[in-house]
Image (tube, rainbow, N blue to C red):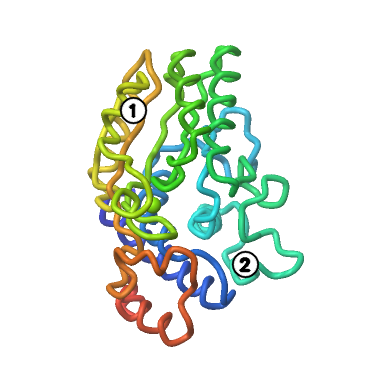
C-alpha cells in the first residue's frame, strides 16, 4: 500500500474505533487513537508477516501488545486485516465475546499474548525471541509498550535479558505520548527521560520517530530492523487521541469511550462521510 492509501486506511480504522467504543459504552480510546497510524503501518505497510486465514502460520512474525488495555486498536486492525469479520467489533466487551476488555490469546485470532498486567508482555516477547533465535528461525518479534508501562521494573529486567542474549530479532516500540492514566508521565508520575539514553545504557540500539507520521515510522522501522547484534527500540512520539481535536493530548481519554454525541462529532472531524 502507498502512504496515501495507508493514511486513508488509518482514518477508516479510527472511525471503526470510535463506533466500536461508543457502541460498547466502555473501553480505552486515547491510546488506540494515538497508535492507529503505527498499527496501520505494521499490518498494511508490509512490516509484519502474517496470514489472517492461518493465524498460527509458523513463518509469521510475532506481534506482542504488552500494554494490553489499548487492545481496541489491535481488534480493529485485525478485523480490517481479515482475521475475523469487521461486524464482530460491535461485540466488544459483551458477555461471551471474543473481544474482551483486555486481549485473550485463546479467544481472538491474531492475538499472540494475553496482556493487561503491565510489564509482563515484554518478558513474554523476550522469551519468544530467545526461543526463535535458539531454534535458528528467522521470525521477528515486535513488541509494543506504553511509556506509562515502562515504570514497571519488570520491563527493565526483560530488557537486560534481551541485551544479554543479543536478541536482534526483537523490536520494541514505545508509544511515547507522555501520558498515562494519572496524567503526564514525567511531570506527575515518574521520570522516564532521557528514555533513549536509558535504553542505550541497557545495550539497545535506539531509534526515534514521529509515530503519527506514516512515512517516518515505516522508514525508521526498516532501518531498525536492518541492524544486527542487539535488540532495538523505536521510541515513537505520538499524540494520545490523535485525529479528534477534543481528545488529543488529554489523559482524560485514557480509559473512557465517547458518548453518542462525542462519537458523532469525532466521525465528522475524521471526515468519514466524505470517505476519509
Ligand atoms: Mg502513555
Q: Earlier in the sequence, mark 2 or mark 1?
A: 2
SS for tag 1?
helix
Viewer-proximal residue among 219 and 117? 117
SS for tag 2?
loop
| 192 w.r.t. 27: above or below | above
Q: Quadrant of residue 47?
A: top left
| 276 w.r.t. 37: above or below | below
Give residue 56's position: percent from left, percent from top: 65, 36
Viewer-proximal residue among 180 and 205? 180
For label 1, the residue is 199
Question: How far, Cα to Cα, is label 2 from label 1?
Answer: 36 Å
Query: Label 2 crowding class (10 Å Cα cut-off): few <14, some 14-19, many 20+?
Result: many
In the rendered picture of this protein, how many numbered marks are placed on residues?
2
In the image, the residue with mark 1 has its CB under 8 Å from the nearest atom of ligand 1: no
| 100 with respect to 82 (left or right) | right
Query: Label 1 crowding class (10 Å Cα cut-off): few <14, some 14-19, many 20+?
Result: some
Viewer-proximal residue among 114 and 217? 114
| 2 w.r.t. 31: above or below | above
The residue at 57%/38% (across/down) is 120
Return the residue found at the far right: 96
> Marks 2 and 1: which is nearer the front?
1
Viewer-proximal residue among 175 and 185? 185
| 218 with respect to 126 (left or right) | left
The residue at 47%/69% (across/down) is 16
For label 2, the residue is 92
Q: Check the picture and name the quadrant holding the C terminus.
A: bottom left
The residue at 59%/66% (across/down) is 89
In the image, the residue with mark 2 has its CB under 8 Å from the nearest atom of ligand 1: no
Return the residue found at the far bottom: 261
User: Mark number for residue 128?
Assistant: none
The residue at 44%/14% (across/down) is 166
Give residue 59's position: percent from left, percent from top: 57, 28
Amino acid at each position: 500500500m502507498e502512504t496515501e492509501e495507508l493514511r486513508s486506511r488509518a482514518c477508516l480504522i479510527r472511525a471503526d474505533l470510535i463506533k466500536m467504543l461508543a457502541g460498547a459504552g466502555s473501553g480505552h480510546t486515547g491510546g488506540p487513537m494515538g497508535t492507529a497510524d503505527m498499527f496501520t503501518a505494521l499490518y498494511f505497510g508490509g512490516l509484519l508477516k502474517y496470514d489472517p486465514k492461518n493465524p498460527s502460520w509458523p513463518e509469521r512474525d510475532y506481534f506482542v501488545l504488552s500494554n494490553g488495555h489499548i487492545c481496541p486498536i489491535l481488534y480493529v486492525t485485525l478485523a480490517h486485516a481479515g482475521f475475523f469479520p469487521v461486524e464482530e467489533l460491535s461485540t466488544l466487551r459483551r458477555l461471551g465475546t471474543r473481544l474482551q476488555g483486555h486481549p485473550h490469546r485463546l479467544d481472538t485470532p491474531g492475538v499472540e499474548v494475553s496482556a493487561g498486567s503491565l510489564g509482563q508482555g515484554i518478558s513474554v516477547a523476550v522469551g519468544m525471541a530467545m526461543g526463535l533465535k535458539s531454534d535458528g528461525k528467522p521470525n521477528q518479534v515486535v513488541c509494543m509498550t506504553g511509556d506509562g508501562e515502562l515504570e514497571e521494573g519488570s520491563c527493565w529486567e526483560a530488557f537486560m535479558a534481551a541485551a544479554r542474549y543479543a536478541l536482534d530479532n526483537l523490536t520494541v516500540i514505545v508509544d511515547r505520548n507522555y501520558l498515562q492514566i494519572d496524567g503526564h508521565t514525567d511531570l506527575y508520575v515518574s521520570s522516564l527521560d532521557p528514555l533513549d539514553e536509558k535504553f542505550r545504557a541497557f545495550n539497545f540500539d535506539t531509534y526515534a520517530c514521529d509515530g503519527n507520521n506514516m512515512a517516518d515510522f515505516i522508514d525508521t522501522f526498516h532501518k531498525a530492523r536492518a541492524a544486527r547484534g542487539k535488540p532495538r527500540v523505536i521510541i515513537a512520539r505520538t499524540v494520545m487521541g490523535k485525529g479528534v481535536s477534543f481528545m488529543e493530548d488529554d489523559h482524560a481519554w485514557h480509559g473512557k469511550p465517547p458518548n453518542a454525541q462525542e462519537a458523532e462529532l469525532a466521525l465528522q472531524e475524521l471526515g468519514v462521510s466524505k470517505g476519509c
